[in-house]
């Protein structure tokens, strides 16, 4: 018996490969199919099942494409009603995989069809649970995402279901059972996930706030619904794509997007389609020179979640500016969250663009030390803090305005394009994204602070310039 966690840091997502005696199962695969097919081929195993824990909101699953290529059976838990052929398993049903069994545990709460898969080993021992978004390490799945698709299903209703699922289906299992969740820290599918991506049920009963033995249902509902922030806007669209199955194959998406375009062709395609020009290079390179009107979201950080948060139309045609050789990677990572309409990339990159006599723009960028000098003499500086509200409330510079990148599309009207704005985030990634978006909307007096708040705290700023909010009771 083999168990492998296939973890994707950009989405903080965990898929799983199970194998026993030449038969394999894949749990919650991402859009690309090659990693799973190659892994099974390495073991000379046949993929028998593609198991889905629920209809995912934060990524488009590759289950349909993978099942077709592997001639495997897609399995969902009870109450699932996908618009394509699958096996909807009964609660308690046993699936045979080589010399092991997989027991279907219906655990509604994150969604109504949410299901946990219990692995029973060759000796009949309950070995591990694959919990999807029902139980995380240190947390549980948020119960408010279904409401974005079905308004009548309230977070409180789902939280109650989740309480019952955890108490009746998961907590009675042996403490030795290994917990393999669908996500780790950084995912928007929970609030307090730990960095660890594997644990035991015994440890979770001891340290996970939501599994406290004496917790009442009312206390649980209050705890898991408190402090929920608005989920990324692309979540409902991904749910519908996973539910209906009306998606193109990853192979076609890559083929359509991986088209090298000369600067002339690139410009013509931009004009003809109204495409978004997305620059995914390193932030340090972008601020120095970029195509006027392009948007920066660097592929080396939390790329896909920020794409999903900020690009509101999933059908938006996209033209890419990437580092050489990374075009297919970027197209794939866009497709993971449902952005399937990449139409080409700039062949030769920015050097080729400049050699063709095309204009480039830049964003003024200063060090934290330089900002500290300016700030010490002028506290009337317009300073935008691009971090989330929780980060800002914990600690921020006096006089800084909290302007979270997450909500820039909704709040941009509150800014004055004639004013000069200094922008910082935690480490310098979000501030460049924000600067690029504002720049594309006619804000030309922008100053990006390299290194963000981490660097600002290390400067000669007076303690009185840093406001610390003590959140301890």
Image (spheres, rainbow, N blue to C red):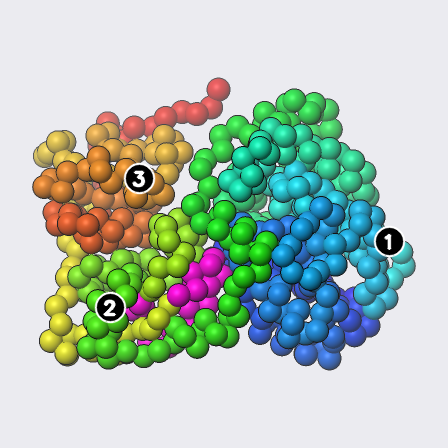
Give the SS element for disc 1: loop
Q: Residue at x 15, y 38 (%)?
A: 416
- Look at the picture and state if 196 lies above or below 143: below
- Look at the picture and state if 280 lies above or below 380: below
Q: Residue at x 57, y 51 (%)?
A: 56
Query: Residue 9's x, y, as percent?
Result: 50, 57
The earlier-in-sequence mark between 3 and 2 is: 2
The magenta region covers: 319-341
Check if mark 3's residue and mark 2's residue have beta carbons within 8 Å.
no
Quarter of the image where one finds residue 331 = bottom left
Give the residue pinned by disc 2.
272
Check if mark 1's residue and mark 3's residue have beta carbons within 8 Å.
no
> Disc 3 versus disc 2: distance between alpha carbons?
27 Å
> Disc 1 versus disc 3: distance between alpha carbons?
52 Å
Q: Nearer the viewer, residue 81 or 6?
A: 81
Give the residue pinned by disc 3.
410
- Look at the picture and state if 199 lies above or below 212: below
The earlier-in-sequence mark between 1 and 2 is: 1
Give the residue pinned by disc 1.
125
Horizontal side, residue 433 vs residue 472: left or right: left
Magenta span has 274? no
Mark 1 vs mark 3: give the one in front: 3
Mark 1 vs mark 2: give the one in front: 2
Give the SS element for disc 3: helix
Q: Nearer the viewer, residue 178 or 17?
A: 17
Q: Nearer the viewer, residue 106 or 360?
A: 106
Q: Residue at x 59, y 54 (%)?
A: 243
């Amino acid at each position: 018996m083999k168990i492998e966690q296939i973890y994707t840091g950009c989405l903080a997502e965990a898929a799983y490969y199970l194998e026993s005696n030449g038969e394999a199962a894949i749990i919650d695969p991402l859009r690309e199919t090659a990693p799973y097919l190659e892994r099974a081929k390495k073991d000379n195993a046949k993929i028998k099942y593609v198991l889905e824990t629920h209809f995912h909101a934060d990524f488009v699953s590759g289950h349909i494409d993978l099942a077709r290529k592997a001639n495997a059976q897609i399995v969902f838990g009870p109450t699932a009603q996908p618009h394509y052929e699958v096996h909807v398993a009964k609660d308690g049903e046993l699936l045979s995989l080589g010399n092991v069994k997989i027991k279907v545990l219906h655990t509604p709460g994150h969604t109504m069809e949410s299901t946990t898969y219990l692995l029973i080993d060759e000796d009949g021992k309950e070995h591990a649970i694959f919990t999807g978004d029902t139980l995380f390490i240190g947390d549980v799945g948020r119960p408010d995402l279904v409401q974005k698709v079905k308004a009548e299903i309230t977070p409180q209703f789902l939280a109650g279901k989740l309480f019952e699922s955890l108490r009746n289906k998961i907590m009675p299992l042996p403490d030795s059972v290994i917990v393999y969740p669908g996500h780790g820290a950084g995912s928007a599918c929970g609030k307090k996930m730990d960095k660890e991506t594997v644990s035991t049920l015994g440890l979770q009963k001891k340290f996970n706030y939501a599994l406290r033995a004496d917790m009442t249902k009312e206390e649980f509902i209050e705890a898991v619904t408190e402090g929920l922030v608005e989920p990324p806007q692309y979540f409902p669209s991904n749910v519908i794509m996973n539910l209906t199955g009306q998606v193109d194959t990853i192979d076609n998406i890559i083929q359509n997007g991986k088209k090298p375009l000369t600067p002339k062709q690139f410009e013509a395609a931009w004009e003809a389609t109204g495409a978004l020009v997305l620059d995914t290079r390193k932030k340090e390179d972008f601020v120095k020179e970029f195509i006027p009107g392009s948007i920066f979201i660097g592929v080396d950080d939390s790329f896909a979640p920020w794409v999903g948060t900020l690009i509101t139309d999933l059908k938006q045609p996209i033209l890419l500016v990437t580092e050489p050789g990374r075009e297919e990677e970027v197209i794939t990572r866009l497709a993971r969250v449902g952005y399937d309409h990449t139409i080409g990339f700039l062949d030769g990159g920015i050097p080729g663009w400049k050699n063709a006599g095309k204009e480039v723009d830049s964003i003024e960028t200063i060090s934290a030390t330089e900002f500290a000098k300016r700030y010490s003499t002028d506290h009337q500086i317009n300073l935008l803090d691009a971090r989330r509200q929780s980060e800002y409330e914990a600690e921020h510079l006096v006089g800084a305005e909290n302007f979270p990148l997450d909500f820039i599309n909704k709040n941009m009207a509150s800014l004055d394009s004639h004013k000069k704005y200094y922008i910082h985030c935690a480490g310098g990634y979000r501030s460049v994204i924000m600067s690029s978006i504002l720049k594309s909307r006619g804000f030309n007096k922008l100053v990006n602070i390299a290194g963000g708040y981490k660097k600002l705290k290390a400067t000669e700023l007076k303690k009185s310039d840093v406001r610390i909010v003590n959140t301890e009771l």
